[in-house]
Amino acid sequence: MKHFRLSLSLSLSLFSFSAFAQTKTFYDFSAMDIDGKPVSMSQYKGMKVLVVNVASECGNTPQYTKLQELYMKYGPEKFTIIGFPANNFGKQEPGSNPEIKNFCTSTYSITFPMMSKISVKGKDIDPLYTWLTKKSENGVLDAPVTWNFQKFMIDEQGHVVGFVDPDTDPDTKVIMDWLNGK
């Protein structure tokens, strides 16, 4: 009986720890914007958010065009896109934050929020991306970032609801259905 109580107590403790980790939402994180100013993700409460790790010298870089089109059509009151430049894949985002900003605005006329360059995998992964990519953190799915332009869908309550592979265009049916509430 004593062993059962200890086992039950340990199980409840582990469950409580697991449930605690899964109660974090997108709103619990912050980042630095492309200009070096702090941004709390809580400012996006009540909005759908598409989080995308981006790179300027990638075969997927032309997706910026469709991302901007989505933002113009659905944002910025109820929907936003947040770009997180990362140099994790093929060193395809070598520029500084000012260089990245200049590239995005002059080449693709990007108006959605862009954050400072971060790491989206490995030992130096940004805490937001740890949460996005690990079921033990987000409570929903494991989705390690496999390349530039992986897209994570965040609902109006700050929960991960899915992701789309890097090679899939932003106007895919999955994202369009999500944006249109289907």
Image (tube, grey):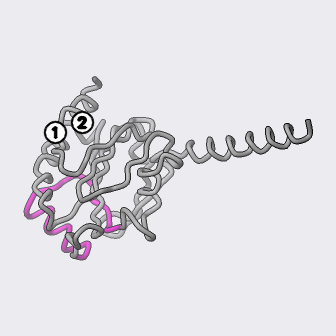
Residue 142 appears at what percent x and percent y?
Answer: 43, 47
**Residue 3 as seen in the image, left or right of residue 95:** right
Residue 20 in magenta stretch: no
Residue 101 appears at what percent x and percent y?
Answer: 20, 67
Residue 59 appears at what percent x and percent y?
Answer: 12, 60
* Secondary structure category for the residue under label 2: helix
The 10 Å Cα crowd at callout 2, few under 14, some 14 to 19, many 20 or more, is: many
Residue at screen point 62% across, 41% down: 19
Count of marks, rendered view: 2
Indicate whether 25 appears above or below 74.
below
Residue topped by disc 2: 175
Q: CA distance from mark 1 to mark 2?
A: 6 Å
Look at the numbered discs 1 and 2 and tell me whether their residues touch, using CB distance below 8 Å: yes
The 10 Å Cα crowd at callout 1, few under 14, some 14 to 19, many 20 or more, is: some
User: Do we see residue 158 in this rendering?
Assistant: no
For the C terminus, the quadrant is top left
Give the image quarter of residue 96.
bottom left
Residue 110 in magenta stretch: yes
Q: The disc labelled 2 sits on which kind of residue?
A: Ile
**Residue 120 as seen in the image, left or right of residue 54:** right
Q: Start and end of the magenta stretch?
A: 95-118
* Secondary structure category for the residue under label 1: loop
User: Do we see residue 159 in this rendering?
Assistant: yes
